[in-house]
Image (cartoon, coloured by chain):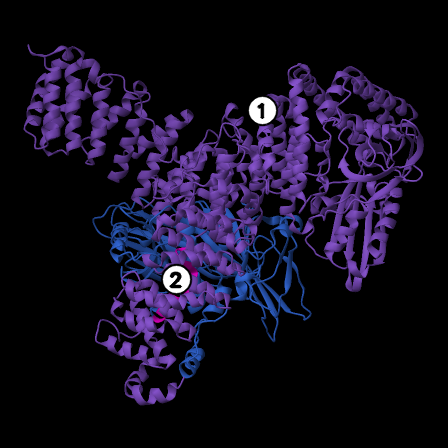
Amino acid sequence: MSSSSAFNEEKGGSSSVGEPEYGHDPASGGIFSSDYKRHDDLKEMLDSNKDSLKLEAMKRIVAMIARGKNASDLFPAVVKNVACKNIEVKKLVYVYLVRYAEEQQDLALLSISTFQRGLKDPNQLIRASALRVLSSIRVTIIVPIMMLAIKEAASDMSPYVRKTAAHAIPKLYSLDPEQKDQLIEVIEKLLADKTTLVAGSVVMAFEEVCPERIDLIHKNYRKLCNLLIDVEEWGQVVIINMLTRYARTQFLNPNINESLLEEGGGADKTFYGSDEDEDEDEEEKEKKAEAAAMAKRKPYVMDPDHRLLLRNTKPLLQSRNAAVVMAVAQLYFHLAPKAEVGVIAKALVRLLRSHSEVQYVVLQNVATMTIKRRGMFEPYLKSFYIRSTDPTQIKILKLEVLTNLANETNISTILREFQTYIKSMDKDFVAATIQAIGRCATNIGEVRDTCLNGLVQLLSNRDELVVAESVVVIKKLLQMQPEKHSDIIKHMAKLTDNIQVPMARASILWLIGEYCEHVPKIAPDVLRKMAKSFTNEEDIVKLQILNLAAKLYLTNSKQTKLLTQYVLNLAKYDQNYDIRDRARFIRQLIVPTEKSGALSKYAKKLFLALKPAPVLESPFKDRDHFQLGSLSHLLNAKAGGYQELPDWPESAPDASVRNVEVPEWTKCSSREKRKEKKVEKPFYSDSEGESGPTESADSESDSASGSESGSEGSGSASESEESGGVSVSEEEEEEEEEEKKTKKRELKKAVQESESEQSSEEEDRKHERKMKQQKSDSESESDEEEESESESSQSESDDSESEAEVRKKKKAAESKPPSKPAKRETTKEKKEMSLLDLDDFEPAPSPQVTPVNNLFSNSLVTDLEGLSLSEAVLLPATITPSSVLKSYELLHRITGEGLSVEYCFSRQPFSPDANMVAVQMQFTNSSASDTKSLHMEDVKLQSGMRVKEFPEIESLPAGETATAVMGIDFCDSTQAANFQLCTHTRKFFVSIQPPVGELMRPVFLTENEFKKEQGQLMGMNEITEKLTLDAKCRNEHAIVQRVTTAANLSRVPCGSDKECRFAGRTVTSGSLVLVTVATREEGAAQLTINCEKMVIGTMLVKDILLALTQ
Amino acid sequence: MINSLFLISHSGDIFLEKHWKSVISRSVCDYFLEAKEKAGDPENVAPVLQTPHHYLISIYRGKLFFLSVTQTEVPPLFVIEFLHRVADTFQDYFGDCSEVVIKENTVTVYELLEEMLDNGFPLATESNVLKEMIRPPTILRSVVNTLTGGSNVGGTLPTGQLSNVPWRRAGVKYTNNEAYFDVIEEIDAILDKSGTTVFAEIQGVVEACVKLTGMPDLTLSFMNPRLLDDVSFHPCVRFKRWESERVLSFIPPDGNFRLMSYHVSSQNLVAIPVYVKQNISFLETGSCGRLDITIGPKQTMGKTVENLTVTIPMPKSVLSVNLTATQGTYTFDLTTKVVLWDVGKLNPQKLPNLRGSISIQTGSPKPEENPSINIGLQIQQLAISGLKVSRLDMYGEKYKPFKGVKYVTKAGKFQVRT
């Protein structure tokens, strides 16, 4: 720019005039205050070539806008500068444009091309701000341009631009609602975005444009839950509110059983007693509650996605942002099982120390919550005590909460507290306190008399307002039991001489009239006095005088006949038509004339009918039908755009809709599956019930794998040392084989099947179990090391006894012939389901649920699937990479004469028996002829070991492959299992020897648990080795991958990135195996293994060392 | 969500307006001003008001009302929290959040508001991000800018917007690397007439001032983290680490920030540092009363109580007071009827005492109630809950920072009923 020369020529004069002003901030002086001629100045400055002049002018103009002054006549001068190079000028021009474009649409169009250019700028900030301004210009003509820009920005590389696109959607929608369909497409696209930056904004757009399209959320539900913690605070609020609504439509009411139970917060109370480790307690409680519920009622199983939401929102209660805390609180209030809602109380009480506006909103919500769930806030009673410095509106809300919290146990403290409040200087507050006392008195029978006495004492208070309020409350209380309190009524009658507050006078008169029979002497006298002052009374008092007169006339006409006539005559000429009407009505009704109708006979009944005592209710009752934390809840009226919180569905909608990338064919099958699920509810209950605790991220994830096998497995662990044990297990196998014959063609043995088979042998098993228990007892004496183990097995077998009971019932249900075919169908579908899951979980499988297995019951699969996902979420860094399963050769093609067999350790829980290691075998027939009846024979095992043979493969055509799964209990040793593999023609001797890493299964431990367990496995049980990491294996990811490939362990979350921890249990005995890899500088590292079984420990050290150093 | 924002002075003057959607006439504020008239005390204005077409959500900060207008359902706390964040940002930028300061910096305020909300939805509220986009005004910079034509507005997207640590910008450099932490505890208590504790609890905050180069990763651990009953964190704190190990692990924002706030459960016995012997009485006749207050140390853990103040809001009928203080000075505000006694340091040998007479408007009845006494105090080098920082470690950077921890105990809402 040749700015200097131009400047000198043209603007020299004006600028020198303007110069001295520049030093000031434009807003401070009153330069621009109202002098419109100055605008010429501004125009000149805007036209100049000097950026500083332009900037100055823009600053002044913006200051005008800020003050609400009209600056629209400058539009042409300003809009010229839209392409100014100076970024601050440009921004201020944008501010101006957005403000006035709506008024000057034609001129605004001049700027559009600049923005269109800006949309293609390489700088993401410029792209974003161009879109921001373009979409903020409310000019209908440019709608198509905006639409195009939004669509383009929605697929921009920069997440910041995509975020801006999300912001632009509601703008366009409000400008032109007809674009809705197209906008929904954009929203759908942005919802799939995986960056946290976009998530909050797009959900906001969703809420404004199409909150009813809940179906768009399905596929993104889990992602949103997982991203939530990293989204910025404001986005969190919007997402949580939306997910609350979503969850209400998609999941079942977790408290469906609670409602049948007794009310009252008894259970809750004990619950909050403990302050530390509350989380653990809670989970235990939850488990107990769940177990109890399971035993008694129809089982409710929480959808894992529902659990996911609850779990992922909980940490946000610690947010510094009050809105986030409130959002989580309302989510828990509306969605969580009753036992878990308690966690929000502490956080909400914390918010009470924030700004008074925050307190105001929080207290409103707490007031609503306390009505429904009183127990939750009881421990925090004192936090609601009122300080004289609180603003009145806060005081009144706190009072409301205190009143709601009052019960038999704490009422005396509360009343004492109320007594100090009555002395307050704040009269509104005193009145509210008196009301509160009245409510406590009605709600809690024990203190009614105390309260009443206290209130009567207040009648002699100096302050008339206090007295008046007391009278009103006393009136309500007396109505409950008038006969006892005629002296109070007399006392109040005396007050009519002094009290001037109309409401109080009216109340007294009504009381006397209503209970005139209790005070027969006083009542006529009161009427006399009132008749005297009738003309000077307020309207409500006059009406009550009429009432009193009528009632007295009916009961005591002798004394009051004339008085009544007098009052009625006075009323006849009253100014107020209500009073005239009332007088006419009463006269016709009570004074008998020849014309009086049938009604007058019933006059007494009409006037002196028994009236129900008023119920003193909290104004916050039933407010919880509004979503808590919403504006509508606060106002107790539906605000514009409020989305109703839906009721829980009767039965759960299809959960599979949330699975990501579902191939089409599964959709129908999953629907069928759902039907089946309903039919067989009692049937699944057990396994699902067991998965409950696992779901809550407990360490006992193993129990889910084999619901039935826990019972015998525990025994067999101890058996292994005993010689007698073998025969028992063999017996078992025989039994099983018999079973097999009866159900020959069932290839896929589902859990429930083996269950049924076992339950049929219930009697025998009980016997067995007793024996085992004895055994384990004897063991515990002999060997100290084994003690803990045997103990656990004992307890487990105890559990299983009760399980057996349940199973018996199930068996009854199962054995019904019609259910059988259905079952077979489900098993088939199960296979499909699990295959599907495989697809789903490829990206982030958790160690427990490596996909391949088709032996799962599908409920289990879905449960675990939720689990695995959510774990991945909780510990984003701990995702175990799905290691490629190493396969070993069992039979070479040449020795096997065309038949080759490979096996691998599938790392699946072997569902028929949890103590066995699942071995997946792949048979390949590369010979020219078919191989028939492939099966195994002559199993030679070391003592204690057991094998569950794979089902016979009838025929394997040439060139085909088949897979089968067998289970081997290696008894926590690496001894080989030898057996013969037989075909219809030949027998091959083969043996399977497990690497030590396969003798364990992963368990999920938290860091704390890990440390605790590690602390108990010191000394002999700890093996430490120093090593130098392989050059390719210096990062965390590689270490995790290598360790998990070497051994079937799961990653333990760890705060430090210098350490990787893994945990597992040996398959047979369930001894813990803890592995720690601590990395140092330069690839140095230290490997620590803690394991009860020293042999396993040493072998594992070798294997992992090898894995990490090569 | 938020349509418009109006800033209204204590006296009811609307001195700034900003609209994010269509312009809403400032006449909408009349509803608010009416409510304000009615409420009298600005603290008593309901934060949420309903008008025929709009909802008004307001906060009161620094003698200013921040009034936002919205037309549709929005969580009220969302708006309230945001408005407070706006006020915090002003405070941060201009050192104060008052009418004068905002009027002085109208343009910067306007630019800030423009960045903070887009179409009524918060866009950038993190002060670190904002400061990169709009630099806080300093005298030097405004001089330089006038001379060079430079601007206060950044031209590139702040690094914080895209990083996963939005609270910290990249490339921070200091010659002196230092990290200071202040553990500030406040005692909230209600004592009754006889001096017994009705209710007491401790609330604390850890304020940090971190000036460290690069991307340091800090770990702050406590000797006794079990004390903490309820905590809330700055978003930088890794919640998982706290859950599992009870240490604060975080990449700190640059400069001053509140790292965490906590609450020490009321079940733990809260030490009350001072006792108050008081006798305030109004005579039945003669329209006067007597006042006698003595303060003494109770559980101070051997530290000196400083900055001791006593505030007594007197009943409205009190005309004047005639008191003598053995230590410090007292004032009586005639309009608010508040006695403020500034005691200073509490000397255990010679207990401070304030006594004298109160005169009441003639003819008005004896006040029903006794005023409550509010105590303010400060104890240096003591966290009354006993919380102690055990160590601060830094990872990720090579240099050795200078570290410091300070403890202060203050009286929060410390009230003695009489």
Stretch in magenta:
B104-122
Question: Magenta-highlighted stretch: main secondary structure?
Answer: helix
Whichever of callouts 1 and 2 sits on the residue coming sooner in the sequence is 2
Q: Is residue A740 magenta?
A: no
Residues behind callouts 1 and 2 on a single chain: yes
Is A1023 on the left-hand or right-hand side of B159? right
Is A909 on the left-hand or right-hand side of B153? right
Q: Which residue is mark 2?
A: A134
x, y percent for residue A771:
84, 20
Residue at 32% from the left image edge and 84% from the top image edge? A19
Give the crowd class for mark 2: few <14, some 14-19, many >=20 residues within 10 Å. Answer: many
Is A606 on the left-hand or right-hand side of A149? left
Q: Is residue B111 magenta?
A: yes
Kind of residue at badge 2: Leu
Q: Pick out the residue farthest to the front.
A: A928
Give the crowd class for mark 1: few <14, some 14-19, many >=20 residues within 10 Å. Answer: few
Disc number at residue B314? none
Q: Which chain is blue?
A: B
Q: Chain of mark 1?
A: A
Q: Which chain is purple?
A: A
Please indicate, yes or no, whether residue A286 appears anywhere in the rendered image. yes
